[in-house]
Amino acid sequence: MNKLIWLLVAVVGGFAIGGLALHRGESINAMWIVVAAGCVYAIGYRLYSAWIATKVLVLDSTRATPAVRLNNGRDFVPTNRWIVFGHHFAAIAGPGPLIGPTLAAQFGYLPGTLWILVGAVLGGCVQDMTVLFLSTRRNGRSLGQMARDELGPVGGYAAMLGTLVIMVILIAVLGLVVVNAMKHSPWGTSTVFATIPIAVLVGLYMRNIRPGRVLEASVIGVALLLAAVVGGGAVDAHEGLRVIFDLDSVTLAWFVIGYGFIAAVLPVWLLLAPRDYLSTFLKLGTVTLLAIAVIVMRPDIKMPALTQFIDGSGPIFGGGLFPFVFITIACGAISGFHALVSSGTTPKLITDEGDVRLIGYGSMMLESGVAIMAMIAATLLEPGVFFAINSSPGIVGATAEAAVTTISSWGFPVTADQMHALATQMGETTLFARTGGAPSLAVGMASVFSSAFGQGMMALWYHFAIMFEAVFILTTLDAGTRVGRFMLQDALSHIWPKMGQTSWYPSVLISSALIVAGWGYFLYIGVIDPNGGINILWPLFGISNQLLAGIALSICTGILVKQGKVRHAWVTGVPLAWLTIVTTAATWEKVVSDDVRIGFLAAADQTATQLAAGLLPAAQAAVAPQLIFNQRLDAWLAVGLTAILWIVIFDSARVCLRVLRNLPVPPNSEAPAEVVAMKA
Amino acid sequence: MKPEVRKFWDFVRELTTDDAYDMYLARHRATHPDVPALSRRDFYIAEQQRKWSGIQRCC
């Protein structure tokens, strides 16, 4: 009977995927995607994760977890599995799975959707679960520590360096997304600015007025945020105020940079912690609302299954389907960053080792589901509108007429009137060239929400969605800068021990300033780039995130082989091989391609030639030297990142070979087994 | 309050760490009653400091 049900799930899932893949018509209903995803997740969880849990990792519920053995009431606390699941999911789910699928929608709905499903079930979920398991067996050690203990110092340092670089690129690209959502949008800008005093107010409430009352404070904070969305509309309508908040992208970039520095040096309780509570509430609420709205509304997907841009000529980012769809969608399919969260906080809360499957595999599955929702929200827009919002002026032309002509010529009809009407409906002056994914996602979400929960509130829903994305992008920005600062302080302490004192103010200021300068540089360049920095920064971010996943999977594979599980090492080995191919191919193209939209060096050379020949307009000529330098820097960065991955792979392979040849290797660093005290 | 509602409410409080101080106090009294416990405010600040010293949030 049981088998029959799973057979049915498999047949329904196969039918849905087949329907998605073979459909060639005007539009297809989003439920096809929802059903396909549901079936793939069900089978992945019920069959594959169960097999990994029992046969590969051999989860052992009788073995006491660190939370039980080392319970100290603070970081080591045995916690209900669903509570841990909630915390872990809140930690891994950021803005990445919303943005990546939106950008990858330029290839059509099919490639991104398939990669999100297959990548998650066979790659991302497996990585998260395996790292969580390994760290749980090692008292919650971090990925870097595990690499040092089990493989040697090379892997450990590579993991650390990779983490630092990815943090800098990640923050820069997220900053750019926020800037693009706010530029010349008084409503959006004033709302996002208002979230800062609101967070501070909530912070003061939780510290001074009613200490630790998280629920009360968060309810007040969320109510204030909603009021800020409405208030933004009033600002937009006010002649005097709207001018103050009508800012260009360079000014906004400086605001974001200044904000990032201040947020990183302020005490956590004042800004970061309250902002995080608010963003977590908003995130869970909005994602749930979106899922309900999609299922209630069952919208039609207007984007074709595949577009002509699979050849690499896409307007949002240059590069062909392979390897760039796998780079663009990192979070949502497989994200190396999760390995850092899975080794650290979460393992110290797990009560029963058997829960590793639910928490590791299950949370990532849910995050993948969020990415699917984002894909649906992006592809339900008219493709012409989607491309008009997401293409930079350097590609489609600077005026509305030029842009609609170019986009319509691709076979995605759109008119300037249509874009103007849409912008008015959303309470904006224009929606052209709002690259970065957040605005088009907000338009998609606003259309689903307003048709599901009340027409006529389009502008409110749109700005609610912008505020929601900005709030947790800024949380990631704060938290990331702070983590980067700690890592830098740790690294600098080897040179000057005093720098390692995390609360010594000169050290805090210097290291924070260095990290902010790092991402601030990429953000600034991204803003002044006439082709829109997303085209450069998002692939770099994707490469670095997949690279971190590659490092994590190498470490996992190495440890599995050391534990005598060579036969099953393909479980992490196959996703590792795939990511290695993808990141190496993407780096190769980004460096050597002759296409100036893909190759960093080709673009640098072209700009240099144009500059020398005096072909550039004055405004572009002024920034050209910076852009040329940056393109060359990006090329070296991409090569450096991929080199780090290969070093870790070789190091891991070296250890594996020694195991197979019975040569000595670093000892197993698992904490000794202790049997769970028998329950009475 | 009905037991199911109570249970749900406790779950929500634990999920949001709203009950963290109550948990700490209960544990503190049970394990070392002779040591004075942190105040609600000091505990909150210390917890936030600890929580945000590592990688807590992802992309």
Image (cartoon, coloured by chain):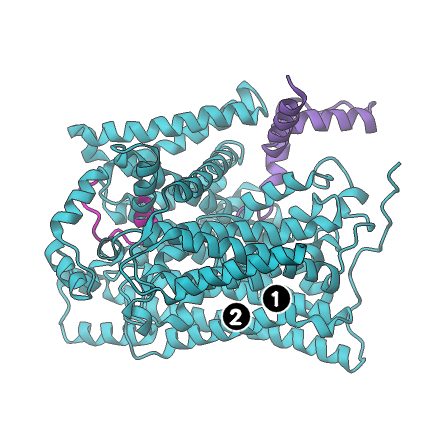
Inspect this view and state whether residue A260 appears.
yes
Inspect this view and state whether residue A151 appears.
no
Chain B, hue in figure: purple
Give me the chain letter of mark 2. Answer: A
Q: Which residue is mark 2?
A: A579
* Residue A66 point in image, percent of width and height: 77, 47
From the viewer's perspective, is A268 left or right of A257? right
Q: Residue B35: say if magenta.
A: no
The magenta-colored residue range is A428-442
Q: Are marks 2 and 1 in contact (CB under 8 Å)?
A: yes
Of residues A191 and A635, which is closer to you in this image?
Answer: A191
Q: Residue A440: say if magenta.
A: yes
Looking at the rendered structure, the kind of residue marked 1 is Leu
Of residues A23 and A293, which is closer to you in this image?
Answer: A23
Q: Residue at x 78, y 82 (%)?
A: A661
Q: Residue at x 34, y 52 (%)?
A: A378
